[in-house]
Amino acid sequence: MRTLSARSLLALGTLALGLSACSVTVRPNLSLSGGTGNLIARFAPDRGEGGTYFVGEPVRFSLTTRTAGYVTLVALQNGSASTLVRNVYVTAGTTWFPRAQDGTYTVAAPRGLQRVRAIFTRVRPTTDLVMRGSYDGTRWNAETNSYLTPYAAGDRDVQETYLYIR
């Protein structure tokens, strides 16, 4: 049996200590059939995906699309959904939300994980996505999929990001 030297034990101890300080971030599972177009290149809060915000702080979202179209942003926190913007026309490239005409998005309680979904269609939607009441992940995905069903797969896309409220 081989024994470890003091140097090896020190290296292993340092590695173990370093790994114990790591945190693991889990991205929400989208489970969506609606987004196959790859039309949204990037969607994230201004502090990056998984960023931390305190109650009362403003938050902005960067949405980069590969083509012009219409976007709806919906937030889900602790089972309650709210629509941030609905059927807003954006050009190809990066758009920041809220836009000047949207006012300010201020982070509010309850604290915890908040998911925000960008729903994009190339053509102007013929209906509005209206979310009211409580939602679990399954119902939220079902509502999004149902809303996107009338649009060709290449003309729609969905991306989700998240942030933490402290």
Image: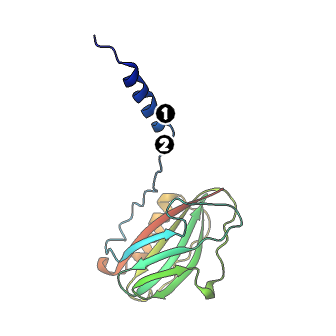
x and y percentages locating residue 68 in the rendered image: 39, 87
x and y percentages locating residue 90 in the rendered image: 46, 87
Residue at point 42% right, 69% down? 159
Q: Is residue 114 left or right of residue 44?
A: right
Q: How is the image coloured?
A: rainbow
Amino acid type, label 1: Leu
One can see residue 96 in this view: yes
- The numbered mark, 2 or 1, whose residue comes first in the sequence reads 1
* Position of the N terminus by quadrant: top left
* Position of the C terminus by quadrant: bottom right
Q: Nearer the viewer, mark 2 or mark 1?
A: 1
Residue at point 40% right, 76% down? 148
x and y percentages locating residue 46 in the rendered image: 54, 70
* Residue marked by disc 2: 22
Q: Is residue 8 above or below residue 125?
A: above
Question: In which image quadrant can residue 84 be found?
Answer: bottom right
Residue at point 64% right, 74% down? 105
Q: Which mark is residue 70?
A: none
Q: Is residue 152 left or right of residue 45?
A: left
Amino acid type, label 2: Cys
Q: Tell me the SS state at disc 1.
A: helix
Question: Is the residue marked by circle 2 packed among few (<14), some (14-19), or many (20+) residues within 10 Å?
Answer: few
Q: CA distance from mark 2 to mark 1?
A: 9 Å
* Residue marked by disc 1: 17
Q: Tell me the SS state at disc 2.
A: loop
Q: Is residue 42 above or below residue 18?
A: below
Q: Is residue 73 left or right of residue 36?
A: right
Question: Is the residue marked by circle 1 packed among few (<14), some (14-19), or many (20+) residues within 10 Å?
Answer: few
Q: Nearer the viewer, residue 93 or 32?
A: 93
